[in-house]
Image (cartoon, rainbow, N blue to C red):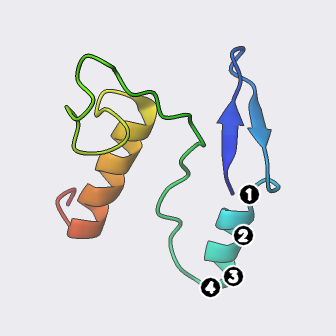
Amino acid sequence: MSYFEDATGEKHFLFGQDGGARLAEHLQTKLLAQIQISPFVQEPAAPFAHTSIYPPETNNGILFTELAAYITGLNE
């Protein structure tokens, strides 16, 4: 399930670990993504510059872009 990384890089699993993977296995389907809980930081100079809440160059931005590409079939 979801986790967050602290300043040292240590992952903290808020709802237990590997629940999403176990559920996907039980349902005989693919786990689409594991995306960390991350605070949204809006840049005051450009509050609406991004089309999502995570800028595309951030870890979560990259994961959401990869997930969207997978879902739409653009990664094949």
Other residues around mark 2 within 10 Å, as few (<14) / some (14–19) / many (≥20): few
Q: Is residue 69 left or right of residue 39?
A: left
Residue at image mark 3: 26
Does residue 7 sit above or below 38 in this rendering? above
Q: Position of residue 34 (x, y in %)?
A: 56, 52
Q: Is residue 42 left or right of residue 18?
A: left
Q: CA distance from mark 3 to mark 4?
A: 4 Å
The reply to whether the C-beta atoms of the residues labelled 3 and 4 are less than 8 Å apart is yes
Residue at image mark 4: 27
- Residue lying farthest to the right in this orientation: 16
Q: Position of residue 47 (x, y in %)?
A: 27, 29
Q: Quadrant of residue 42?
A: top left
Amino acid bearing label 3:
His
- Residue lying farthest to the bottom in this orientation: 27
Q: CA distance from mark 4 to mark 1?
A: 14 Å
Other residues around mark 4 within 10 Å, as few (<14) / some (14–19) / many (≥20): few
Residue at image mark 2: 22
Other residues around mark 3 within 10 Å, as few (<14) / some (14–19) / many (≥20): few
Q: CA distance from mark 1 to mark 2?
A: 6 Å
The reply to whether the C-beta atoms of the residues labelled 4 and 2 are less than 8 Å apart is no
The reply to whether the C-beta atoms of the residues labelled 4 and 1 are less than 8 Å apart is no
Amino acid bearing label 4:
Leu
The reply to whether the C-beta atoms of the residues labelled 3 and 2 are less than 8 Å apart is yes
The reply to whether the C-beta atoms of the residues labelled 1 and 2 are less than 8 Å apart is yes
Residue at image mark 1: 18
Q: Nearer the viewer, residue 66 or 7?
A: 7
Q: Earlier in the sequence, mark 3 or mark 1?
A: 1
Q: Please, what secondary structure does the residue beneath circle 4 have?
A: loop
Name which residue lies at 17% across and 59% down.
74
Amino acid bearing label 1:
Asp
Does residue 38 sit above or below 41 in this rendering? below
Q: CA distance from mark 4 to mark 2?
A: 9 Å
